[in-house]
Image: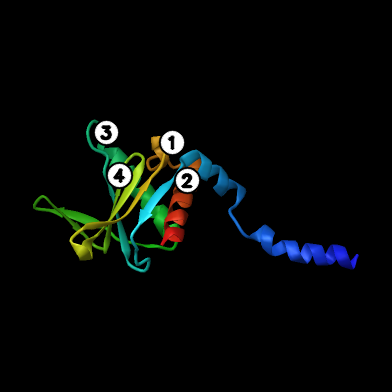
Amino acid sequence: MKKLLFTIMLLIPYLMIGQSKEDKKLQRKLKLEIVNKGLNLDDKFVIVGSFGGNWDASYNENTEKNWNTSFFKSNLNTGDYSIEDGYLIIDGRYQVNIDKNSMTIKDASNNFKTVAFLEWIGPSGIGTLTNDTNKAKRKYIIKSLIESN
């Protein structure tokens, strides 16, 4: 009995380390790639939908709302933006451009140089659709970004 208890005690730390089953599944599906040159996670992130071309304007609005919510739920500070005289004015340090299958993060305090780039494979509805599957994907992407820092 003591040996069994001792073995279980040794295995508990190993069982708790690592990714959840859901994270591993998302990792395989999304094939997420991250290049991160360093972020200050205490600063504000301003989400900007970057769907261009033939996409309806509602795609940008939905994308911004959904990703803002996901960033907020991940305990990251979010800011807002406005457009004045044709210029994008952001209230935050990082401008986060979201496209169908990528995210580019630019540092406003450093002449908008790119400080992180994320790219994933899979359905392009991750940003625009609010169902539970896409919420989980957004959460996983943000969690991976935080861990890469």
Q: Dot 3, crowdedness within 10 Å: few (<14), some or many (≥20)?
A: few
> How far across and down, in percent of the image, does residue 13 sit?
68, 64
Residue that label 2 marks:
137
Residue at (42, 38) in percent of width and height: 121
- Compared across the picture, whether 136 is left or right of 54 comes to right
The outermost residue toward the right is 1
Of the residues under marks 2 and 4, which one precedes in the sequence? Answer: 4
Residue that label 4 marks:
61
CA–CA distance in space, label 1 to label 2: 10 Å
Where disc 3 sits, the SS reads loop
- Compared across the picture, whether 137 is left or right of 46 comes to right
CA–CA distance in space, label 2 to label 4: 19 Å
Where disc 1 sits, the SS reads loop
Residue at (40, 53) in percent of width and height: 69
User: Which three-letter amino acid code belongs to the residue tagged 3?
Assistant: Trp
Residue that label 1 marks:
122
Q: How is the image coloured?
A: rainbow
User: Which three-letter amino acid code belongs to the residue tagged 1?
Assistant: Gly
> How far across and down, in percent of the image, does residue 31 sit?
46, 42
User: Which three-letter amino acid code belongs to the residue tagged 4?
Assistant: Glu
Residue that label 3 marks:
55
- Considering only vertical position in the picture, is 68 above or below 54? below
Q: Are marks 1 and 2 in contact (CB under 8 Å)?
A: yes
Where disc 2 sits, the SS reads helix
